[in-house]
Image (cartoon, rainbow, N blue to C red):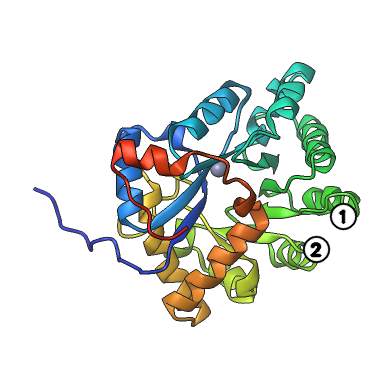
Amino acid sequence: MSTSKRAIPAFSQPMIDTHCHLDYLKERPLDELIKCALEANIQSLITIAVSPANQQTVRDLLQLHPMIYGTQGVHPHDADQLTQDGLDENRAHIGLSKMVAVGEIGLDYHYEHSPRAVQRKVFEAQLQVAVDHNKPVVIHTREADEDTRAILANFSRDLKKRGVIHSFSSGMALASFCLDEGYALGFNGMCTFNKADNVREILRYTPATQILLETDAPYLTPVPYRGQENAPFYLPFIAEKIAQIKALTIDDLLAQVYKNSVTVFGLHSCGKYPWAEWRETNGYTLDTE
Ligand SMILES: [Zn+2]
């Protein structure tokens, strides 16, 4: 017996899932994920690299569909696995078409899978890659507010493109610092969770011009689909909740966050792909580009 859940809301404005991990989704094949995402009016998605083992996978994904953009970078969990060769490899590919940022990088003192000192060193080394290649960054930070702030402060002058603190769940002081510095904050299904009043408080404080939408799929599935594998096509539930928290119409919110996504990641400069041809052979249509 299956309980029926509310259908995915249909919005007329296009959306961009700025943070997902396509290669970690297991329940549906890629074509089906893409088809469902396009039906939900998700126009583009950014699939995020996390470990030395999946950098090439992300590069391969960029070739598979015009809507897929990507990043190169190693998550703090795997910081102790990043060798100099690995770092050089990421440097060599960060300039690829549709490779939009260095990430995800940062500090995670909650799980502490890599020693803190190693996390800081690897975070700094990857921020330097972003500086050298003039790319924005996708930052993961958990229970490391003070060190994140100190490190970003050191890069304040050189890191011109800024970027996003994704899945923002840190404290107000870090939020305020990052917003003042010009970073965007990324919000996902967490804002639909009963217990996440802290996230909703940060959202209320964040100007609409600095909000990005993300799913972080396969993690953090929004209500009412919690317990199932997350996917980019659930993004409308997150958008709906954020519009409600910000007291904006859905159209106003989506128009603004779309603009933010394009600006933060420079998506307009990634259009060298033979999209029209790809779509023709695969039967997809996109009305809004
Ligand atoms: Zn992530």
Q: Residue at x 45, y 42 (%)?
A: 275
Secondary structure category for the residue under label 1: loop
Judge by depth and name the residue closer to the eye, 228 or 254: 254
Q: Residues within 10 Å of mark 2 (few under 14, many from 20)?
A: some
Q: Which residue is mark 2?
A: 181
Taking the image as four quarters, which one is ligand 1 found in?
top right
Mark 2 vs 1, N-terminal side: 1
Q: Amino acid at mark 1?
A: Ser
Residue that numbered label 1 is attached to? 156
Cα separation between marks 2 and 1? 7 Å
User: Relative to 216, does residue 251 appear above or below in the rendering?
Assistant: below
Frontmost residue, 150 versus 36: 36
137 horizontally vs 155: left or right:
left
Q: Residue at x 59, y 40 (%)?
A: 98
Residue 273 appears in the rendering: yes
Q: Secondary structure at mark 2?
A: helix
Dividing the picture into quarters, in which one does residue 5 lie? bottom left
| 224 to 279, vertically: above or below | below
Residue at x 30%, y 59% (from the top left corner):
224
Would you say the residues marked 2 and 1 are in contact, meaning their CB atoms lie under 8 Å apart? yes
**Residue 112 tag number:** none
Q: Residue 21 at x, y = what percent?
A: 49, 38
